[in-house]
Amino acid sequence: MPGAPAGATAVAVSALRVVRGGREVLHGLNFAIPTGTVAGFIGPSGCGKSTLMRAIVGVQVVKGGTLTVLGVPAGSAALRRRVGYSTQFPAIYDDLTVTENLRYFAAVLGAPPSDVDRVITEVSLEPHSEALASQLSGGQLTRASLAVALLGTPELLVLDEPTVGLDPVTREELWDLFHSLRVDRRVTLLITSHVMDEAARCETLLLMRDGRILMRGTPDDLRENAGTTNLDEAFLRVIRDAERSRS
């Protein structure tokens, strides 16, 4: 099923502020993500990526600003079946098998029962489909959680560190899946990572540091602006330039 029409905006953020524990962790963010885009939110641990993702899916209280997802305010009931979300930490039941977990979440989301087999195949969990979640490895748990996010026909996928702990072959398979979702269904994907080789796979990057967006552009934009072909070095140069401008 196709996603939103070409030219639409999947996520629009304006002056977004989030305060947690009495401390402001997101400082007036502004950006927009077009539909059918693979957008990477790149930055070190603790820079605010996960907080931003929680705000986008509507489970994070915001202090100020506006956040629109697929044309409606973030967290709206209308988005329940239109947004898939996979957290850093697997959110499935240990005492159920992979298949049982997916059948349960499919029923909750109103997804067709046939989706269970489809998503198991998409995340390469066929050999472990009848294993209890408590018996899965860390990488297998990550894939099972991702499978939940793929149930139904989400127009937006919010994936927080989706490939952490996975072997190179599985990571490659998942990135092939992400790009096929973008091409075949015009799904928009928001993917967080702190690994710069993941950044090269995204169409647009938002580089984050200390709750701020330092730069937005393509991987080639980042390399060109930093004057280097190495993405790790380019990110470090952007950070240093930002620190100098604030000092």
Image (spheres, helix red, strand yellow):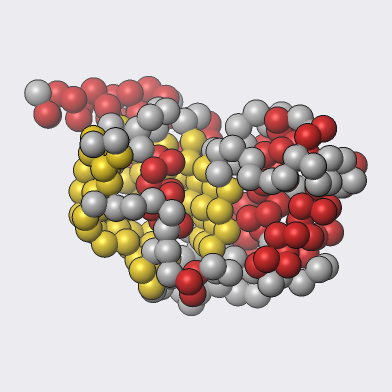
User: Which of the image's four quarters has the C terminus?
Assistant: top left
Judge whether 214 appears above or below 182 on screen: above
Please give left or right for residue 83 compared with residue 210 in the image: right
Q: Residue furthest left?
A: 247
Based on the displayed image, in which of its 4 quarters is residue 119 positioned? Answer: bottom right
Judge whether 135 appears above or below 150 on screen: above
Could you tell me which residue is drawn at 39 percent across and 64 percent down?
Answer: 74
Please give left or right for residue 49 compared with residue 181 in the image: left
Judge whether 101 appears above or below 47 on screen: below
Q: Nearer the viewer, residue 52 or 133?
A: 133
Kindly tell me whether residue 194 is visible in this rendering.
yes
Please give left or right for residue 190 compared with residue 61 in the image: right
User: Which of the image's four quarters has the N terminus?
Assistant: bottom right
Q: Nearer the viewer, residue 237 or 122?
A: 122
Q: Nearer the viewer, residue 173 or 99?
A: 99
Q: Position of residue 229 (x, y in %)?
A: 41, 28
Based on the displayed image, in which of its 4 quarters is residue 14 positioned? Answer: bottom left
Could you tell me which residue is drawn at 75 percent across and 59 percent down?
Answer: 104
Could you tell me which residue is drawn at 49 percent across and 36 percent down?
Answer: 193
Q: Position of residue 134 (x, y in %)?
A: 78, 34
Q: Position of residue 191 (x, y in %)?
A: 50, 46
Count of marks overlaid on the render: 0
Could you tell me which residue is drawn at 43 percent across and 69 percent down?
Answer: 76
Kindly tell me whether residue 229 is visible in this rendering.
no
Q: Position of residue 171 (x, y in %)?
A: 67, 37
Q: Nearer the viewer, residue 55 or 155?
A: 55
